[in-house]
Amino acid sequence: MSFMLPKSMDRSNRLPKTPQRRVEPGTIIAVASGKGGVGKTFMSITLASAFANLGERTLLVDGDLGLANVDVQLGIAPETDLAAVIAGWIELEDAVINVDGGAGKGGFDVLPGRSGSGALAELSPEEVARLAAGLSSLSLQYDKIVLDLGAGIEANCMRLARAADKALMVITDDPSSMTDGYAFIKVLRGYAPDVEQHIAINQAPNRATGQQTYEAIAMACRQFLGFRPTLAGVVMRDEKVREAVRRQRTLISTDPKAQPIQDAIAIAQTFVTRGKRPHLPI
Ligand SMILES: Nc1ncnc2c1ncn2[C@@H]1O[C@H](COP(=O)(O)OP(=O)(O)OP(=O)(O)O)[C@@H](O)[C@H]1O
Ligand SMILES: [Mg+2]
């Protein structure tokens, strides 16, 4: 498959070698699901773009190694990627690509995966740990890091999710998405109890169904896991999302008023508000 480089991609504008350091690390948000095809990549790209529009320095990471969902949906053809980082050929920050001007300049940065390269499941625990540590150190340069995870509850996915401060579980009203989403929540809770868990109901036919889907999962979590993940928001189903993916354009750039985009922007806003650390009393 070959891709056209979008005009918005500015290769000359990579991260400076001595990037500006934040005093405190930014927030890493893992976008996760038990079942595939629920809308993680759509949510990740839209959140990254929305964070950028809200003035947050943002990095989008394709954690679904081997399938490179983010490249395809953004319509970019990166020369370097996480596979090269893991192989030790380049440094993590040298694999970063600027989209729409890059982080801090109206757009956001991307750490791409690569189609056909080794999947996350094939990495050794040490390699995943190195990747997770690399992301944690990159969080010193960003306000938000959005980590688009592959579907499933396998160990490496959990190891990577553990690097996050927050997990956004993407779930639809499809029964298998609900049961697999619950399984992910349960395993992550056991594996990384400090990761704050939030739920986004995606592809909802209407708000009431979305709310009901959330309530069913939240009730099971409360009953069997002893905690209730918060509802980050309900994102409506709209064919425009699929059309945009087919055209390798982001819906947020072509039709920012579309309902699923407005819904995802509202979720991004809650993370910006919640993500702010309280000021210490003087
Ligand atoms: N709100 C929505 N309304 C309509 N279609 C949607 C919506 N969200 C996602 N989709 C469509 O669902 C499909 C899967 O979306 P996406 O690739 O983002 O899912 P994913 O969870 O990342 O999948 P995978 O597990 O394969 O990585 C795409 O065709 C996308 O356009
Ligand atoms: Mg995906």
Image (tube, rainbow, N blue to C red):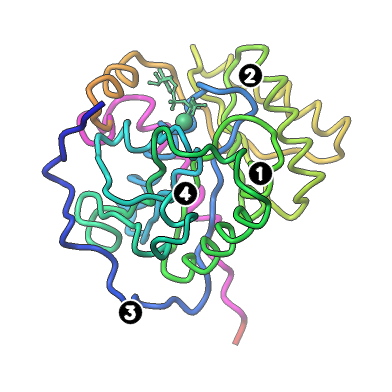
Does the magenta-highlighted stretch encompass residue 255?
yes
Q: Dot 4: what SS?
A: strand
Query: Does residue 86 appear to the left or right of 105 in the view shown?
Result: right
Foreground mark, 1 or 2, reads: 1
Nearer the observer, 258 or 80: 80
Q: Residues within 10 Å of mark 3 (few under 14, many from 20)?
A: few
Q: Amino acid at mark 3?
A: Thr
Magenta-colored segment: predominant secondary structure: helix
- Which residue does the numbered mark 1 point to in the structure image? 156
Residue 254 lies in quadrant: top left
Q: Amino acid at mark 2?
A: Ser
Eyeballing the image, is 107 above or below 238? below
Foreground mark, 1 or 4, reads: 1
Q: Earlier in the sequence, mark 1 or mark 3?
A: 3
The reply to whether the residue tagged 1 has its Cβ within 8 angstroms of ligand 1 is no
Q: Residues within 10 Å of mark 2 (few under 14, many from 20)?
A: some
Foreground mark, 4 or 3, reads: 3
Q: Which mark is residue 177?
A: 2
Question: Residue 259 at what x, y percent from top left?
Answer: 35, 24
Q: Residues within 10 Å of mark 1 (few under 14, many from 20)?
A: many
- Which residue does the numbered mark 4 point to in the structure image? 146
Q: Earlier in the sequence, mark 1 or mark 2?
A: 1
Residue 31 lies in quadrant: top right
Q: Dot 1: what SS?
A: helix
Q: Amino acid at mark 4?
A: Val
Highlighted range, magenta: 251-280
Image point (66%, 25%), residue name: 214
Query: Does residue 32 appear to the left or right of 245 in the view shown?
Result: right
The mark total stands at: 4
Q: CA distance from mark 2 to mark 4?
A: 21 Å
- Which residue does the numbered mark 3 point to in the structure image? 18
